[in-house]
Image (tube, grey):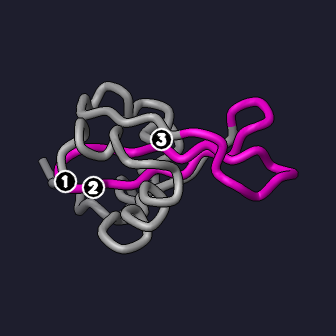
Amino acid sequence: MKSKKFKCLNKKQKINTLLKYGSFLADRKYGPFKIMLYELNGCYVEAYFLSWRKEVMFFNVFESVENLQPYLRKIDLSELFHQVPQKKI
């Protein structure tokens, strides 16, 4: 499903589509929101939850990997550097 088609769905259809076809990738906090990131057939969908309501308030759909920056900053790669064999000179 392309992003244009997803945007045309109603809220319940969007939720069902994400649960059935989407792949959960990550989550983050932003102000009062918990944001859950999904991949859906080549596009990304953020589902915004209000922490105390436990229901999706709205969705953000995008295709640009630049919008993934808030999630990429959370990835800790330090363990990978400890596992890389050092070359002897």
Give residue 65's position: percent from left, percent from top: 26, 32
Residue drawn 82% across the image and 53% down it? 53
Dot 3: element: helix
Residue drawn 46% across the image and 48% down it? 10
Residue holding disc 3: 71
Whole-number angstrom distance, CA of label 2 to CA of label 3: 17 Å
In primary-sequence order, the first of circles 1 and 2 is 1
Disc 3 residue crowd, few under 14, some 14–19, many 20+, Cα 10 Å: few
Instruction: Give the amino acid at mark 2.
Output: Leu
Query: Vertical placement of 73 versus 47: above or below?
Result: above
Residue holding disc 1: 1
Instruction: Examine the residues drawn in magenta and state their main secondary structure.
Output: strand
Residue drawn 49% across the image and 55% down it? 26
- Nearer mark to the viewer, of 2 and 3: 2
Residue drawn 31% across the image and 46% down it? 6
> Marks 2 and 1: in contact by CB < 8 Å?
yes
Report the magenta residues as a range. Answer: 30-58
In primary-sequence order, the first of circles 2 and 3 is 2
**In the drawing, does residue 77 fall left or right of residue 31?**
left
- Nearer mark to the viewer, of 3 and 1: 1
Whole-number angstrom distance, CA of label 1 to CA of label 2: 7 Å
> Marks 3 and 2: in contact by CB < 8 Å?
no
Residue holding disc 2: 40
Residue nearest the viewer, comparing 69 with 16: 16
In primary-sequence order, the first of circles 3 and 1 is 1
Residue nearest the viewer, comparing 80 with 17: 17
Instruction: Give the amino acid at mark 1.
Output: Met
Give residue 77's position: percent from left, percent from top: 42, 50
Dot 1: element: loop
Disc 1 residue crowd, few under 14, some 14–19, many 20+, Cα 10 Å: few
Query: Vertical placement of 56 versus 31: above or below?
Result: below
Query: Vertical placement of 57 versus 55: above or below?
Result: above
